[in-house]
Image (cartoon, coloured by chain):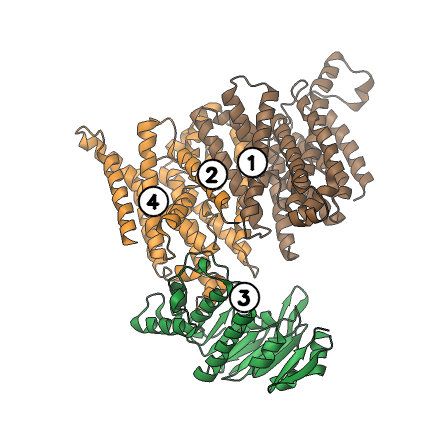
Chain colours: A orange, B brown, C green
Amino acid sequence: MKAKLGVLAGFALVLIALFIFMDANGNWDYVLPRRGKKILAIILTGGAIAFSTMVFQTITNNRILTPSIMGLDSLYMLIQTIVVFFFGSTSLTMINKNVNFAISVSVMILFSGLLYKFLFRREGQNVYFLLLVGIICGTFFQSMSSFMEVLIDPNEFQNLSDKMFASFNNVNTDLLNLSIVCFGAIILYFMKFTKYLDVLSLGRDAAVNLGVDYDFVVKRLLIVVAILISIATALIGPITFLGLLVANVAHQFLRTHKHSILITGSILISIIALVGGQLIVERVFTFSTTISVIINFVGGVYFIYLLLKGKK
Amino acid sequence: MKKRYLILALVIFSIASVFIGVSNISPLDLFSLTEEELQVLFVSRVPRLVSIVIAGMSMSIIGLIMQQLTRNKFVSPTTAGTMDSARFGILIALMVFSNATPIQKMLVAFIFALLGTFIFMKILDRIKFKDVIFIPLVGLMFGNIVSSITTFFAYKNDMIQNMASWLHGDFSLIIKGQYEMIYISIPLLIIAYLFANKFTLAGMGEEFAINLGLNYKRVVNIGLVIVAMVSSVVILTVGTIPFLGLIIPNIVTIYHGDNLKKNLPHTALLGAVFVLACDIFGRVIIYPYEISIGLTVGVIGSAIFIYLLLRGKAHGL
Amino acid sequence: MIEVKQLSKKYGSKYVVDDVSLTIEKGTITSFIGPNGAGKSTLLSMISRLLSKDAGEIYIDNQIVGQVKSNELAKKISILKQANHIDIRLTVRDLVSFGRFPYSQGKLTKEDWIYVDEAIEYMELEDLQDRYLDQLSGGQKQRAFIAMVLAQNTEYILLDEPLNNLDMKHSVQIMKVLRKLVDEKGKTIVIVIHDINFASFYSDHIVALKDGKIVKKGPTAEIIDSCVLKCVYDMDICIQDINENKMCVYFS
């Protein structure tokens, strides 16, 4: 198992090195900070998404779900659309990015908080139910934004459509620092829950039997997941199927139930996918497509394959 | 709700629909119409009315058929990947034939919608865990995946904006000469009516149906063909109307029980009345501009869907 | 000792467990019997805190369930529900080691592993311990889950239909193990069981439930009685004595 993780780590490092040093031609002062920032953003978001999907799948005891479909993506797009709709496209670039980031993250966290509160009021809560309501809210947000998009000036629309797809091409340093702090705090908070993950994967009854305060732990973990997804989305944009892709690859490749290994593995796979994807975007497609489009495509196809080959 | 009230509502809303619009035509002028008014009426207003009624009816009915076939109240073209697959098909048609005719687009969209729905049924077959809520969740995921594949090709070919128009249901662009394709739905709905009881039996499961001497595969396939065909026709003429196929049959079931054959006329009528009402609402509220049907139904529909979910939960589903 | 006092649970307006009081003595096997929908499993789930109660109190060794920390309770009482279809790739040994979670919080000590080995040995799973769960037959899987509960080393063990889907041979094997646990290790076992003959042959006490209420409770010999069973199951059951045990014949 250690060997497999080692292979993943090595592969990730090689890709990162390739990404940073390829075609640098000695322009270190220019190239290094730019690419370094991209890599940092990739590691952060990739890690956060992989981590939260893994935790989420363990809580739901289901490998075909991802927290990204809970409507947060659509909500993020709605917020961006509203900003452009009411303040014009220049505001997206003019407004302090930190403000936009803070507003987006807080609205998304507020939304998930309300969703949880609303659904966990009754007993026998069902995470599937939560997710379905989330998706429907997502459709609702989407209807709203696509309506506004029709009314927006085509020139301004261009600015907005850049936001529709995740991209590492323009990562703001200030946001990066802010996100690192947020992630750090959340990871610290999460630490005391790590030990429960293996047990939670046995299902609710078994976990309660083994003395886990199930409702308490699951609620806290869901909040952690929502915050991580919100920050990742606000930082680079929506990548719906990244989590799904890497969590399933991690399960297939590592074939273990231990979350310490699974989570580390999925974070590494996530970094490999994103750095590899970004290399393809820059070198093969020469920026004619974006990383999220590729990842969603590959992730989606892989996932349909998984669903169809699943046991009867 | 009696059938005659629904018919009455349909007639009233239809008349209202014809006479609401920017160029003012009053019912009193009906016998002294100017050339221009006649033009407006027959080029824009009547086609709009016809397409609203047919789209409302057919989307509701194929929703009902899907719910019968899967035995799940929350499955519909929107929650089973059918719509997303049809949209993928349209994109492929646009890419392959640079100037695709409507018929070409429809055929390709149909093939993709059929394939997508078929894959969804196959996935259902392979899932061990058949929770009422889990199945539409899988369908929505599947739909998301298909549209992410669509986005991949659309982005590469600079067609994102083009595709957005198929995403959003809108009746305001319907004029004579561009909507007639929607008439294809009518014979399909008649076939659906004739097969209604067989769909109910097929929904009980393959073994159950075969035991009763039903050609299970054929009935399911006919159902899926109708669903895919109607979805592609509607998406090409009107665009996506989210959740329609989900909420209308459910409302009918609530007050009318579960008999498919009896429910079909009610579902069709209520679907038409609902879409008409939403359309009139959208045209009146910010007059002289209008809100598209995709948004009105999207907003009202998601609210009703969540209500149905909560209600179902209170009744133990 | 487990004491249940005026316990109730309702779904909607229907009581599934209705004002139930009972005491479970240490060092015995107690069986809950009754027709479908009698509330047996619900009662068991409430005693083990898997399900919340609507009214009443449950005491385990004079401590109120719900006031004790869940983790402390897990060292005292364990429950195994029916339908253990988990979808993760786990070996038998891994599964059994989860039983030590209440003590070690996931970081198993040498002592923990001794308990794990003992449990595996007790359930005769040595040859299977490195197999994955999805490679096991129904009976082997059930033994693995019981081994996990054994590793948890609790005084009280609650089992919800442990014989479900098992053939005669494996059913007898499991029941013998349970009997041995009580006789040799002094455990207290409560099971929900459908086969009244297994209840009759292996348990010390029987609680007969119907429509959420207790019809009668008492030593096995008192409950395995034509009159009582007629009242519970609403059918004529003929009782015959076979080697000091009572056997119910209800096939005609």
- Mark 2–mark 1 Cα distance, whole angstroms, equals 32 Å
Q: Mark 4 belongs to which amino acid?
A: Ile
**Does residue C159 appear in the picture of this structure?**
yes
In the rendered image, which quarter contains the N terminus of chain B? top right
Q: In which chain is the residue bearing label 1? A: B
- Quick check: B43 left or right of B137? right
Mark nearest the camera among 3 and 2 is: 3
Q: Mark 3 belongs to which amino acid?
A: Gln
> In percent of the image, x 36 and y 53: which residue is there?
A262
Residue at the disc numbered 1: B116
Marks 1, 4 in one chain: no
- Quick check: A118 left or right of C125? right
Q: Position of residue C172 (x, y in %)?
A: 53, 74
Residue at the disc numbered 2: A79
Q: Mark 2 belongs to which amino acid?
A: Ile
Q: In which chain is the residue bearing label 2? A: A
Residue at the disc numbered 3: C82
Residue at the disc numbered 4: A269
> In percent of the image, x 31 and y 33: which residue is there?
A279
Q: Secondary structure at mark 3?
A: loop
Mark nearest the camera among 4 and 3 is: 3
